[in-house]
Image (spheres, rainbow, N blue to C red):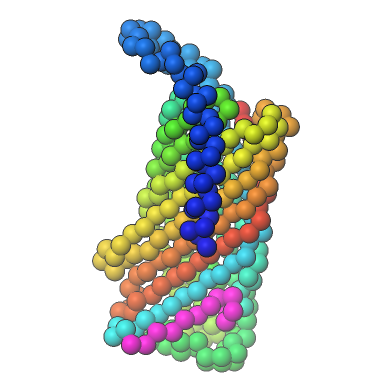
Amino acid sequence: MFKKYVILFFFAFLIILQVVVGQEKKENLPDTVMAKKAVRKEQRKIARQNLNPHFRLSFNSTYSFLSTQLRFITPSGLISFQVGLEDNLGLQDKDWIFSSNIVYRITPRSGLFGMYYGLNRNSTFTLKNDIYLPNDTIKAGSFIRPYFNTQVFSIGYLFSILTAEETFLAAYFNLYIMNLKTGIQTNLPIQDFNYHFLVPLPNIGLLMDFKLQKWLHLMGGLGVFFLNDINGLGGNTHEFYVYLSFQPTKWFGVNVGYQEFYVFVREYLDDYNMNIKYDFNGPSMSLKFLF
């Protein structure tokens, strides 16, 4: 499914790119002539002064379909057991997720990109079937409180590929701080299970914002990260979103579209190989402010 999103995203990007590149070449024709150092410095100063907007701030709300799974593989690799937090432990499989992101353009070419989202879920549940965990089993009939909490912060460098007035296409290189907590609390404290994953991860991606009409924009973003096994730690993440943005004024817009976020983490826990899969996706709305 994710590959389809990537193909569609870049297909749309290539079509729009062919349209705008010709326009940008015409606008940038004088820049191809070698200018004196002082003149070029003055041109950069004027470009920074004329850059508008400097900030793009979005507050997003996504009605998400959630899927969270924990899988434990024995040291021999012959036996594995899996727990679905929605299917087996009663966590809600649909919920609102709120997030935000900011783009700060320091110059026409460079800037900063930041993102945050968080989701805290828990439930109280009477276990219908035995749950197998490393070195323990929680018996059917136990009163349990499962939880899954995620906080993600991201900040990094933004480089604009297209700088024409009506187009924005940029690559970013970010550092993720992912704070993931999950566990099962029971009426027998000795059987409590807790897991905490806090790690910085690099991330690369693309952002776009193309003006289709005076009041209508096409926005999108794609970020990916892959990590091979390093001391037993590995995994991958990706995020994807696409919006139609209705912008009645120069400083405000309403976005309607789709968002997806996926995390896969692989790590050793008590000699077990533990895999965590976490996915949310669904229709999304956001408010955009520009200044």
Residue 253 appears anywhere in the view: no
Q: Is residue 36 left or right of residue 96?
A: left
Q: Residue furthest left?
A: 231
Quarter that holds the C terminus: top right
Q: Is residue 87 above or below residue 224?
A: below
Q: Is residue 90 magenta?
A: no
Quadrant hosting residue 194: bottom left
- The percent position of residue 204, horizontal first and vertical second, equals 40, 47
Query: Which residue occupies 44% across, 46% down?
Result: 205
Q: Position of residue 232 (x, y in %)?
A: 29, 69
**One can see residue 33 in this view:** yes
Residue drawn at point x = 52 percent, y = 24 percent: 23
Q: Residue at x 46, y 75 (%)?
A: 70
Q: Say whether residue 80 is magenta.
A: yes
Q: Nearer the viewer, residue 127 or 238?
A: 238
Comparing 271 with 22, the one in front is 22
Considering only vertical position in the picture, is 190 above or below 68? below
Residue 152 % position (x, y): 49, 54
User: In which image quadrant can residue 75 be found?
Assistant: bottom left
Q: Position of residue 147 (x, y in %)?
A: 55, 71
| Magenta range | 78-89
> Which residue is at the front of the view, 30 or 72?
30
Residue drawn at point x = 48 percent, y = 58 percent = 3
* Residue 209 versus residue 274 in the image, above or below: above
